Image (tube, rainbow, N blue to C red):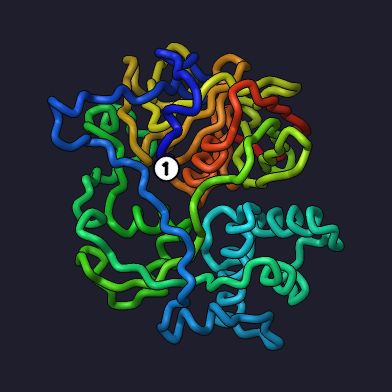
Amino acid sequence: MTGLVSRFALVAVLALSACDDASPAKPTPAKTVQKSPVQAPPGVPAPSATAASSPIAQAINAAIIPTTADPQARRDVLIRIQTLLDRAHFSPGVIDGRDGGNLTLAIRAFQAAREMPVDGVVSQRLLEALASSDGGPVLVDYTITPADVAGPFSPPIPKDDYEAMAQQPAMNYHDVVEMLAERFHMDEDLLRALNPGVDFGAAGAAIVVTATGADTLDRKVDRIEIDKGLGQVRAFDEAGVELAVYPATVGSTERPAPSGEWAVRTLAPRPTYTYDPSRLTFGKPKDKLTIKAGPNNPVGSTWIDLTKDTYGIHGTPDPRLVNKRASHGCVRLTNWDAAELGSAVKKGAKVVFMGAEARAS
């Protein structure tokens, strides 16, 4: 997300949102503060050319479609496919080694883009198509750094306790595992499973992670399609070439997302969040509250403001729930997908909402 601030001229305060009130985090002069209480977005290293050496990693890097009902072999090939889809910008959401709707959507989008039969099925043909254009390893070694373990970290807070959130100096990651899992687009349980017995709080510890690459696109996004029925966001360049596809939580029955064509108004990396009980129908606080920036902020680490007043595309503190639980009207992506989209979208890019919400609030 480095450089997101320079993408647009940020407005002083963004519009009140139907799902939230987001605004850019105000930078603090370096002369007065030695270290910001808000975690800077972690840099993601480019995929290593050297595959991880552990037996677990070797099995996953070479995984093929199993010919028998072997749960371990199925998990391994799903990790490989999910990671290759992620690198190709057909996001499966969280990489977790499991079947699911977001993986199916990503496969179908990839198949359509490659003019393959579109069935959403995990197959050897799919794996070969992915690997033919990207032969790099999907798991690589990573050494936990002193900066990783230094934080700062924030205590876990129930998602509906806005008053407790407002008392925090920042809404940072809760621990090293959460931070590393999000950095490498992984489910926390999978990160632990691939690294049994590792002390994640020890600088210098060697771990295995997915090689997802940088969260950037190679061209500017000129148009965004938001499919409310599928729960999917698609990004296109000015020539109409599809650049990326992301799973998304889009509105709800209680607060449906809009229809029609709008545009990107501005971008707020590391936004704050305002809970205003006079504008919102959820939560218990009676007073207006401001929640500081951070990846566990209710709108995550990126806010893309739309010309439809009070609506935006944003990140989330819980990537596992993307396209699995209704939002309060806006478009919710994983933090890394929101960052990738935000890094490439043009100010004024068209945003088209299509279809109808397929989930209840």
Pick the front one: 33 or 352: 33
Q: Position of residue 283 (x, y in %)?
A: 41, 27
Quarter of the figure with residue 190:
bottom left
Residue 51 appears left or right of 112: left
Q: Position of residue 219 (x, y in %)?
A: 63, 41
Pick the front one: 280 or 186: 186
Specify whether residue 175 is in view: yes
Q: Position of residue 42 (x, y in %)?
A: 36, 48
Taking the spot 47% from the left edge, 43% from the top edge, the residue there is: 335
Residue 33 appears left or right of 332: left
Q: Position of residue 354 (x, y in %)?
A: 76, 31
Specify whether residue 193 is in view: no
Quadrant position of the C terminus in the picture? top right
Task: Residue under label 1, please give it.
Answer: 317
Element assignment for label 1 = loop
Quadrant position of the N terminus in the picture? top left
Amino acid under label 1? Answer: Pro
Taking the spot 42% from the left edge, 54% from the top edge, the residue there is: 44
